[in-house]
Image: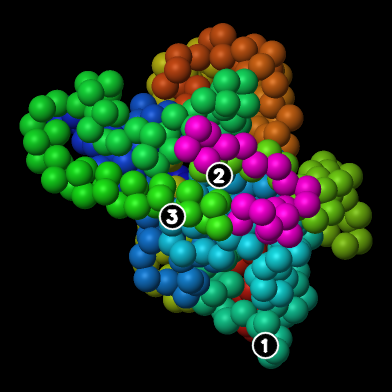
Amino acid sequence: MNKGRQVVKMTSSDQERPQFLFVKALASRGRLEAVTQQMGYHPQYLDSFLKMQHYLLHMDGPLPFACRHYIAIMAAARHQCWYLVNLHMLQFLRVGGDPQWLRGLDFIPPKLRNLNEINKILAHRPWLISKEHIEKLLKISEQSWSLAELVHAVVLVAHYHALASFVFGCGCELEWLDGRSILKSTLPGNQCFCESASGNSCNLELLRINRKRSLDSCVELESLRERIQRIHLESEGREEMRPPQQDREEDFDGEIVRATDLSCYVQDPDFGYQDFARRDEDQTQIFRVQDYSWEDHGFSLVNRLYSDVGHLLDEKFRTVDGLQSNAMAKRQGCESSVFKRGIWNYIHCMFGIRYDDYDYAEVNHFLERMLKVYIKTVTCYPEKTNPEMFSRFWKQFKHSEKVHVNLLILEARMQAELLYALRAITQYMIS
């Protein structure tokens, strides 16, 4: 956890920030995803999150736009996160992705498929990644990756693994699976910005300012709706165009709206998290932050190979570190900084990352057992989050505090994956 950072304080103008950010999201996408709504409880964080994700997916970068969304699908599928997979299936088609790729990993270019091993390892046992994995992807061939492309891909993979934890941790996935309603109600064309805004109490001035932008967005999204329908109609009667193990549900317009089987996007499904303490100590050593840290090593490497992303990541880490949690910490009998650092270091410890200047007895002292069980489940195997665990964890927390804990999980997990991947890249570069 970053130390000695300023606490981000909410000013009077911040009271309008959630509405402003919601309007921006609605105007740019024509819908307000459940994830955005949950993060809106902490507008400072939501702002940095949206900037980071927009840069990763939509701004100039080493990877083609369609590949970015497909990597998001691959990463989310490791945790069976239907919410994110279906969201990015639509985005993949929106940017001109080949519909054949949605049949599964067997139908994508070998270069992209070769990323699957790193995706699998980072999702479940990031301490196993080595410079040999990096070398295999970078070796000269028709399917070789450049260093810049690989860094872009690694950041995407870590981002969507961690975001899957947030989706499960805040109940977005459970709600979607129970009601099958969240994603369908927010599909492009089903709910335009103008309709959505009236239900979100956005003030009239913001509506007036963003009206033209929103109307343009609605036209674009309607075009996407027609394109998806056209793809579906063109594939009718051609059985070979349908995934052999992937069913698709259709709405009344005949649109492809969701995948109902994610196995085609996952290889080696039995590979999952294993307690770091049970590792083979001859092959894996404890990762000491004093030897390789985000601030001293990872930040500069990312910024050098993928311009500006290091700054955006660092802003996100700093922002979540600065969110206030006084009431939450007080109920646990400690200072806010102690409580947050306990959660952060506990998550890193589960991935074998240790801080020499931290007393790990504080984790057991300040984090009660049910909270630790919840954090471990959401961090290491979020797909196993169940309603009972969800309910028992929530009892002593306000809703904004629940979201805060899940933001800490998201960022600590993402940083852990990045540390291992970037260290392996560094070792490859100096070998």
Nearer-the-camera pick, 282 or 181: 181
Kind of residue indicated by mark 1: Glu
Q: Is disc 3 surrounded by few (<14), some (14 to 19) or many (20+) residues within 10 Å? A: some
Q: What residue span does the magenta drawing correspond to?
A: 235-254
Question: At label 3, which amino acid type do we have?
Answer: Arg
User: What is the distance, in whole Å, between disc 3 and disc 1 at their CAs?
Assistant: 32 Å
Element type where label 3 sits in the image: helix
Residue ID at (57%, 37%):
250
Q: Which residue is drawn at 62% across and 37% down?
A: 249
Task: Label 2: state its secondary structure.
Answer: strand
Majority secondary structure in the magenta region: loop
Give the class, few, some or many, for how many residues have Cα within 10 Å of label 1's Cα (few <14, many ≥20).
few
User: In the rendering, which numbered label is found on residue 142?
Assistant: 1
Q: Is residue 377 visible?
A: yes
Point out residue 273 in the picture as x, y percentages from the top left corner.
79, 44
Are discs 2 and 3 less than 8 Å apart at CB?
no
Name the residue: 14% across, 33% down.
207
Q: Which of marks 3 and 1 is nearer the N terminus?
A: 1
Circle number at residue 227 = 3
In the picture of the structure, the residue carrying the numbered disc 2 is: 256
The answer to whether any part of residue 47 appears in the image is no
| SS under mark 1 | loop
Q: Earlier in the sequence, mark 2 or mark 3?
A: 3
**367 left or right of 285?**
left
Expressed as whole percent of the image width and height from the top left, the position of residue 186 reads 42, 34
Foreground pick, 25 / 313? 25
